[in-house]
Amino acid sequence: MEGILNFEVFIRFLKNMFLSSYENKLDKKGRVSVPATFRAYLSSIGYNGFIAYPSFSYSALEACSQDRIEKLSNTIDSLNPFEEKRDYFATSVLSESENLQFDTEGRISLSRKLLNHANIKNSILFVGLGKTFQIWEPKNFEKFKVVAKKKAFQNRSNLKWENKQKGELS
């Protein structure tokens, strides 16, 4: 019974965020299959697709649910409407965002603009980041991951651990 309970907790956990990394091939029509766990999470919150936009910092794509991009839009809207910063954020994120819907086989079609930004030609790596995910060219991500691990190690003291996390079993 304990093994079944742990498995159910694990499945519920997977459905509540984007986790792990999955590599898939881009087909000749520019479509790629989105990982089933990512689709399951999006479906559980009522979406049949996701929003993608070019990353500020990397040759990668940022991806999130509709409610997450709305939250980002609200944050941008909270800035003074006459400040340049507001326009810079709106232009860099919102005007570059694309709403990507799943087809009947769980695939999406990425525009040439997004593929070019991420230097994607054949293979795509979906990288789970909790409430968001990124889309990378696999070799570029491997290079980034080396740097990320080193920086995470250097900054590990910044993570604060509460005694009991939300949803954690005692």
Image (cartoon, rainbow, N blue to C red):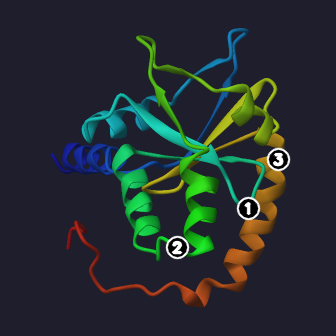
Disc 3 crowd rating (10 Å Cα; few below 14, some 14-19, many 20+) is: some
**Residue at x-position 68% and y-position 17%:** 30
Residue 23 visible, this orientation: yes
Distance from Cα at disc 1 to Cα at disc 3: 13 Å
Q: Which mark is residue 140?
A: 3
Mark 2 element type = loop
Question: Which circle's residue, 2 or 1, is located before the other in the chain?
Answer: 1
Quadrant in the picture for the C terminus: bottom left
Determine whether 71 is above or below 94 in the image: below
118 with respect to 96 (left or right) = right
Q: Which residue occupies the extreme front position in the image?
A: 82
Three-letter amino acid code at disc 1? Ser
Q: Which residue is mark 1?
A: 57
Give the percent coordinates (x, y) of residue 114.
70, 35
**SS class of the residue under badge 3?**
helix
How many other residues sit within 10 Å of disc 2, few (<14), some (14-19) or many (≥20)? few
Question: Residue 106, percent across and down?
Answer: 45, 19
Residue 10 lies, in percent from the top left, at 32, 49
> Mark 2 highlights which residue?
82
In the foreground, 107 or 71: 71
Q: Position of residue 70 (x, y in %)?
A: 37, 53
C-beta proximity under 8 Å, tags 1 and 3: no
- Label 1: how many residues lie within 10 Å, few (<14), some (14-19) or many (20+)? few
Name the mark nearer the viewer: 2 or 3: 2
- Residue 118 seen from this side: no
Q: What residue is drawn where x is 61% and y is 54%?
A: 91
Q: What is the C-alpha distance between the residues marked 2 and 3?
A: 38 Å
Q: Quadrant of residue 125?
A: top right
Residue type, numbered disc 3: Asn
